[in-house]
Image: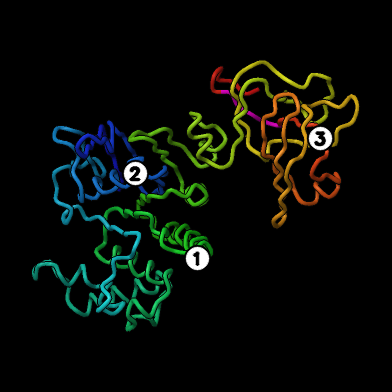
């Protein structure tokens, strides 16, 4: 079941939460709505679910070509998972998952045995077999979130909507659960739209990423497309660490090239720390001269803060711990800095 939202506008008083937003979620895909707080992603998700409504006369929501703009939330057949689980503390796991089925009108409600069978199938699906009699307080955060997911799936939704589903979990559990969600999605193939402000999370598990900023969509593409070919300075800076070099910047030189020029013309250039090459300062070497101001080694990677001698700009570089040791670099050393890959939006070309 595909999702299509067109020209969605939503205001709260003088604040514009969504400004003419269009969105397409292909059938069976896992799509991430990614952006900073206040960008409009959760508001858009709630409008798709029917929990909020766009401004009068604004936009349309379609599920697989069917207009559901004015269909109540309870009749849209949407599975919705909240950040903070929203489980009933006084109910067991089984009762929580079965809740959406048991509150249906009698004529629409499955028989009790069918409800129990469905719950046990879902418990197996979300890897929580044997926990049906426990209460939420007896579960870990990751287990509670999987119960919330099973509850959303119990009503056999057309689409699944997740609002910051891992936001309340610690970093280790987040990683484990998001990888589990990717495998789970591949198994059920249910059209899924999830909201996150975690770039790593979106890039790791989504088929497609929709990046939002200031009530608008900045870019849509696969994780590799949005990371390697950002459409705007905002996208470039939002997706991972980046250096923004102004004025004269180091020249980009191939790994095997040697030429004396070290700086190029004025402009604004964006370059990621891992795209910066460092080498000891030796006479005749290519690259801009810089001095190492700070070195931080954590795990296999080393992060260095260097200062360009000519422009006094600070630049963050990232190299492997092995390379740092081999080069013998330390605080106070002079180095040559070159750019493996960079981008300039002013002139719309890579230097």
Please tell me in which quadrant of the rendered image residue 63 appears.
Answer: top left
User: What label does residue 173 carry, if any?
Assistant: 1
Question: In the image, is 27 to the left or to the right of 48?
Answer: right
Q: Are marks 1 and 2 in contact (CB under 8 Å)?
A: no
Residue located beneath label 3 in the image: 335
* Marks 3/1: CA–CA distance: 40 Å
* Marks 1/2: CA–CA distance: 23 Å
Q: Is the stretch drawn in magenta largely helix, strand or loop?
A: loop
Tag nearer the camera, 3 or 2? 3
10 Å crowding of disc 1: few (<14), some (14-19), many (20+)? some
Question: What is the quadrant of the C terminus in the image?
Answer: top right
Please tell me in which quadrant of the rendered image residue 278 appears.
Answer: top right
| Residue occupying the point 32% across, 41% down | 40
Q: Which residues are magenta?
A: 340-344
As helix, strand or loop, the secondary structure at mark 3 comes to: strand
Question: In the image, is 227 to the left or to the right of 113?
Answer: right
User: What label does residue 147 carry, if any?
Assistant: none
Residue 343 in magenta stretch: yes
User: What label does residue 41 carry, if any?
Assistant: 2
Please tell me in which quadrant of the rendered image residue 122 appears.
Answer: bottom left
């Amino acid at each position: 079941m595909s999702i299509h939202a067109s020209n969605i506008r939503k205001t709260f008083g003088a604040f514009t939460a969504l400004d003419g937003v269009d969105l397409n979620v292909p059938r069976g895909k896992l799509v991430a709505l990614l952006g900073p707080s206040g960008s409009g992603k959760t508001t858009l998700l709630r409008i798709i679910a029917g929990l909020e409504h766009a401004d009068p006369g604004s936009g349309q929501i379609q599920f697989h070509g069917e207009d559901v703009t004015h269909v109540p939330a309870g009749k849209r057949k949407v599975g919705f998972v909240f950040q903070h689980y929203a489980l009933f503390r006084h109910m067991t796991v089984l009762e929580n998952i079965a809740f959406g089925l048991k509150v249906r009108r009698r004529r629409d409600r499955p028989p009790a045995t069918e409800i129990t069978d469905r719950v046990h199938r879902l418990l197996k699906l979300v890897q929580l077999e044997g926990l049906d009699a426990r209460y939420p307080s007896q579960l870990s955060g990751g287990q509670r979130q999987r119960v919330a997911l099973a509850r959303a799936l119990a009503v056999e939704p057309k689409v699944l909507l997740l609002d910051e589903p891992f936001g309340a979990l610690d970093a280790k559990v987040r990683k484990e659960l998001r990888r589990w969600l990717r495998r789970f999605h591949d198994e059920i193939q249910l059209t899924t739209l999830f909201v996150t402000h975690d770039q790593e999370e979106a890039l790791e598990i989504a088929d497609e990423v929709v990046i939002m900023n200031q009530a608008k969509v900045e870019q849509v593409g696969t994780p590799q497309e949005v990371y390697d070919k950002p459409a705007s300075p905002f996208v470039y800076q939002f997706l991972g660490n980046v250096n923004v070099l102004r004025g004269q910047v180091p020249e980009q030189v191939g790994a095997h090239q040697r030429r004396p020029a070290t700086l190029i013309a004025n402009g604004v250039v964006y370059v990621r720390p891992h795209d910066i090459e460092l080498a000891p300062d030796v006479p005749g070497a290519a690259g801009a001269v810089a001095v190492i101001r700070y070195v931080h080694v954590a795990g296999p990677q080393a992060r260095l803060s260097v200062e360009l001698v000519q422009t006094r700009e600070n630049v963050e570089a990232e190299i492997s711990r092995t390379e740092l040791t081999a080069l013998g670099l330390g605080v106070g050393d002079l180095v040559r800095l070159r750019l493996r890959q960079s981008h300039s939006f002013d002139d719309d070309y890579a230097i």
